[in-house]
């Protein structure tokens, strides 16, 4: 058993001090490297995992190829019923799985539980969707012809997720991919294997209980080698990848080279604009959650605060006061708002970032230091810096917020749009003119364009994703499902003549 008393709950999630990290063709195995899952709040081992080897991966994909036809032919509402059961299995383990998320990723418990809730919500959404994968009938220009669109499964969908949302991002993709009739091959982050295994166990149980092939859902714990294999695998028509812009570019190149499709959810560099007429109480609370929440490790984290000169001093003063009240500590403890960064590597990127900020003329208003305690804790940081300093263009994945001053709305929008990334953005104002300009053609260039709410914490019903270096993908709600299916445009001649389109006469 686990040595530590506070790790005993892991047994209820089917975890052991040592685990196999590859769920392949309905069987748990693992012949790859042995890795250790580490607790970010003390950098001590939680458990070990044997990852998948490349042979394990190959075997898994062969099993998917054998299972996919049967799943593609299963009626969509029946597939929805399986996803409904997955949602129920998650409901039953909501607090345990939320606790594991908090333990292994380092986010606070409320956010760990919220993340599992997000997957449950996705299951519910996908169940409804399973009866609404509607095609359409289009007017044909030819007599006695019918034209329609039919949506068919792709077969197998690869899902590569990041450490910061080790469960929710799987949910956005897998729930939709499954009801759309695809087998899912999932590679989670190498540093959150316990979440991957525990989540997969719940899904595997549902498949088994329903007498379905385990290969409908595959989990391959592993690193870049497995990710690379997924990107290059011609059996996988769609690869959904969440991670940095740099790695996303490699995935895009590899998948493009074999004419596969990608769904990319890459780096963000999200701004909040505070107008002169803003409700500053809402703005301060929103910036606090958006910049400090999850220790700044969301792709939707607010990294830039753009404040009208008339309210700048008050806004910054109130924000600094709010920062001074943030309680850092064990993410599992009630009242903690700031947990550790996920890894020692994240901590050193923070330190390097602070060095770069100082050398580029940044002035630290609060924070800027790593904390003198075990684990990867850093101080929530606010920096005044020129908006064209090179560091501002980067996604420093930690709680560092840059503040800037502006005079006109146009200037603020230009600043918002001036970075390479285009994920999320928000404006605080009570003026309808400002709101509609912001969401219109010359407003924010991001995929998520909010008003009077934080940049993070999106609902699952909308399409989630962003433009430019963020990769262009859209996941979760709205019509994102279409990316997980192949559209067949069918023109059917039910007459006895052969009129050609565009009025062409070709003899005969
Ligand atoms: C991410 O950080 O990869 O909108 C996703 C949000 C969450 C998802 C973030 N629902 O902040």
Image: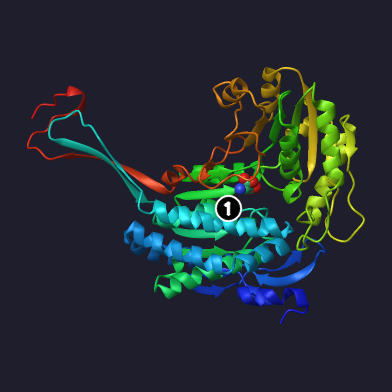
Instruction: Name the residue rendered at 40%, 63% in the picture.
Output: 81
Q: Where is residue 483 in the image (x, y as percent from the top left)?
A: 44, 45
| Label 1: how many Cα within 10 Å (few below 14, some 14–19, many 20+) | many
Q: Position of residue 490 (x, y in %)?
A: 25, 41
Image: 2 above or below 308: below
Instruction: Name the residue rendered at 75%, 28% in the picture.
Output: 306
Q: Where is residue 248 in the image (x, y as percent from the top left)?
A: 61, 44
- For residue 340, what is the image quadrant? bottom right
Image: 26 above or below 352: below
Q: Which one is nearer the viewer's eye here, 342 or 314?
A: 314
Tag count: 1
Q: Does the residue labelled 1 lie within 8 Å of ligand 1?
A: yes
Tell me the quarter of the image containing the N terminus: bottom right
Is residue 341 visible to the viewer in this orientation of the structure?
A: yes
Instruction: Name the residue rendered at 21%, 31% in the picture.
Output: 140
Image: 215 above or below 426: below
Tell me the quarter of the image containing the C terminus: top left
């Amino acid at each position: 058993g686990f040595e530590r008393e506070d790790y005993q709950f892991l047994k209820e999630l089917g975890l052991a001090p040592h685990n196999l990290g590859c769920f392949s063709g309905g069987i748990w195995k693992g012949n790859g490297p042995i890795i250790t899952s580490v607790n970010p709040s003390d950098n001590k081992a939680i458990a070990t995992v044997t990852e998948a080897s490349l042979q394990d991966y190959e075997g898994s994909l062969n099993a998917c190829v054998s299972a996919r036809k049967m799943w593609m032919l299963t009626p969509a509402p029946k597939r929805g019923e399986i996803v409904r059961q997955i949602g129920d299995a998650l409901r039953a383990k909501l607090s345990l799985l939320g606790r594991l998320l908090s333990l292994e990723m380092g986010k606070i418990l409320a956010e760990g539980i919220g993340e599992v809730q997000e997957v449950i919500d996705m299951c519910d959404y996908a169940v409804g969707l399973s009866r609404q994968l509607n095609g359409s009938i289009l007017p044909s220009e030819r007599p006695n012809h019918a034209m329609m669109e039919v949506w068919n499964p792709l077969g197998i969908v690869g899902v590569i997720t990041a450490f910061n949302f080790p469960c929710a991002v799987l949910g956005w993709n897998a729930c939709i991919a499954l009801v759309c009739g695809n087998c899912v091959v999932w590679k989670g982050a190498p540093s959150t294997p316990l979440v991957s295994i525990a989540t997969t166990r719940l899904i595997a149980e549902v498949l088994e209980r329903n007498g379905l092939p385990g290969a409908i859902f595959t989990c391959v714990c592993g690193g870049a080698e497995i990710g690379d294999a997924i990107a290059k695998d011609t059996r996988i028509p769609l690869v959904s990848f969440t991670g940095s812009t740099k790695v996303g570019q490699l995935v895009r190149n590899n998948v493009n080279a074999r004419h596969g499709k990608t769904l990319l959810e890459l780096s963000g560099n999200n701004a909040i604009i505070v107008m002169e007429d803003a409700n500053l109480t809402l703005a301060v609370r929103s910036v606090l959650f958006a910049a400090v929440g999850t220790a700044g490790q969301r792709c939707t984290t607010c990294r830039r605060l753009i404040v009208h000169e008339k309210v700048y001093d008050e806004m910054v003063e109130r924000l600094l006061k709010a920062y001074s009240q943030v309680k850092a500590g064990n993410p599992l403890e009630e009242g903690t708002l700031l947990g550790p960064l996920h890894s020692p590597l994240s901590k050193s990127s923070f330190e390097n970032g602070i060095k770069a900020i100082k050398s580029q003329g940044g002035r630290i208003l609060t924070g800027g230091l790593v904390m003198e305690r075990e684990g990867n804790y850093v101080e929530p940081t606010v920096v005044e810096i020129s908006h064209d300093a090179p560091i501002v263009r980067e996604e420093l994945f930690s709680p560092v917020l840059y503040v800037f001053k502006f005079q006109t709305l146009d200037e603020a929008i230009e600043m918002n749009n001036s970075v390479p990334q285009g994920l999320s953005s928000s404006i605080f104002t009570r003026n309808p003119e400002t709101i509609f300009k912001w969401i219109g053609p010359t407003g924010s260039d991001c995929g998520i364009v909010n008003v009077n709410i934080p940049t993070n914490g999106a609902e699952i019903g909308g399409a989630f994703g962003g433009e430019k270096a963020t990769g262009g993908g859209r996941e979760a709600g709205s019509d994102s499902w279409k990316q997980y299916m192949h559209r067949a445009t069918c023109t059917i001649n039910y007459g006895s003549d052969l009129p050609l389109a565009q009025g062409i006469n070709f003899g005969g």
